[in-house]
Image (spheres, grey):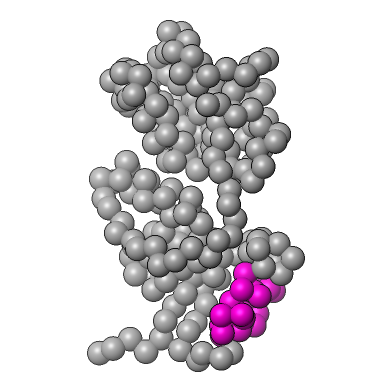
């Protein structure tokens, strides 16, 4: 039996604001997909195409929802999709086979590293010094699995991953489940402040400008 309806994940937050997020509402209307209700938190209705139904939710969850076929298609940033895919790979040894249909050319964020240093420092030098002093490296990020994957990749290139192969992803400042390796604290904003105040060794932040954050090469 053929499916009669198409369920599309509509990202809540700034994208639903006509004055922010690259004006997704206007973009959809220009493409022939006029919406109603999305700007007020949903439910989203597509007035010109009756078989499309909007699922108004958090883009952080769309990757998982696509993986279990709760959604047919979703609008979400590459970063959040990658975060869910990495979580499944690293924690559950499972793959989410997703296909990117097209880019809406919105957002244009980048990931930057954050350290508590009085002057700019190369990442390789910073990590070399850190590995000399610590058995357990702590990192904070709103995207913990992207941060974990990034740090593991850096340590692997330095030939140090074997020392920090264990990892634990936890809520911020909960008791560590490991004594050596990498502990990643998931944050809900103010990531750079946590590094500055000594709450972690490294931070990984999402930014559009990066002007307020120390960027590591």
x%, y% of residue 128? 44, 13
> Which quadrant is home to the N terminus?
bottom left
Q: Exactly how many numbered labels are in the figure? A: 0
Figure check: 135 above or below 215: above
Figure check: 6 above or below 99: below
* Residue at the limit of the structure toward the top, as seen here: 132
In the shown orientation, is residue 17 left or right of residue 110? Answer: right
Figure check: 2 above or below 79: below
x%, y% of residue 189? 64, 42
Q: Residue at x 44, y 66 (%)?
A: 102
Is 39 contained in the magenta span? yes
Q: Residue at x 37, y 89 (%)?
A: 4
For this rendering, which residue is in front, 80 or 188? 80
Which quadrant of the structure image shows residue 28?
A: bottom right
Q: Is residue 174 visible?
A: no
In the shown orientation, is residue 3 left or right of residue 59? Answer: left
x%, y% of residue 150? 42, 34
Q: Which residues are magenta?
A: 24-46
For this rendering, which residue is in front, 207 or 163? 207
Which quadrant of the structure image shows residue 25?
A: bottom right
Which quadrant of the structure image shows residue 115?
A: top right
Q: Residue at x 32, y 42 (%)?
A: 91
Q: Residue at x 55, y 31 (%)?
A: 113
Q: Is residue 193 visible?
A: yes
In the shown orientation, is residue 151 left or right of residue 88? Answer: right
Is 17 contained in the magenta span? no
x%, y% of residue 112? 56, 35
For this rendering, which residue is in front, 126 or 5? 126
């Amino acid at each position: 039996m053929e499916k009669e309806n198409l369920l599309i994940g509509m990202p809540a937050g700034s994208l639903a604001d006509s004055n922010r997020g690259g004006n997704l509402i206007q973009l959809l209307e220009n493409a022939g997909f006029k919406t109603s209700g999305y700007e007020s938190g949903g439910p989203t209705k597509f007035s010109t195409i009756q078989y499309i139904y909007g699922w108004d939710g958090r883009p952080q969850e769309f990757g998982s929802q696509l993986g279990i076929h709760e959604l047919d298609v979703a609008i979400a940033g590459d970063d959040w999709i990658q975060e869910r895919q990495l979580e499944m790979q690293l924690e559950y040894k499972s793959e989410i086979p997703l296909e990117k249909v097209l880019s809406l050319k919105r957002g244009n964020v980048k990931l930057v590293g954050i350290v508590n240093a009085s002057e700019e420092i190369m990442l390789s030098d910073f990590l070399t010094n850190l590995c000399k002093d610590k058995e357990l490296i702590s990192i904070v990020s709103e995207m913990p699995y992207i941060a974990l994957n990034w740090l593991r990749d850096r340590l692997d290139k330095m030939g140090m991953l074997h020392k920090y192969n264990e990892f634990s992803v936890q809520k911020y400042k909960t008791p560590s489940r490991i004594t050596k390796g990498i502990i990643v604290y998931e944050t809900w904003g103010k990531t750079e402040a946590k590094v500055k105040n000594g709450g972690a060794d490294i931070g990984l932040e999402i930014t559009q400008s990066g002007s307020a954050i120390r960027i590591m090469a």
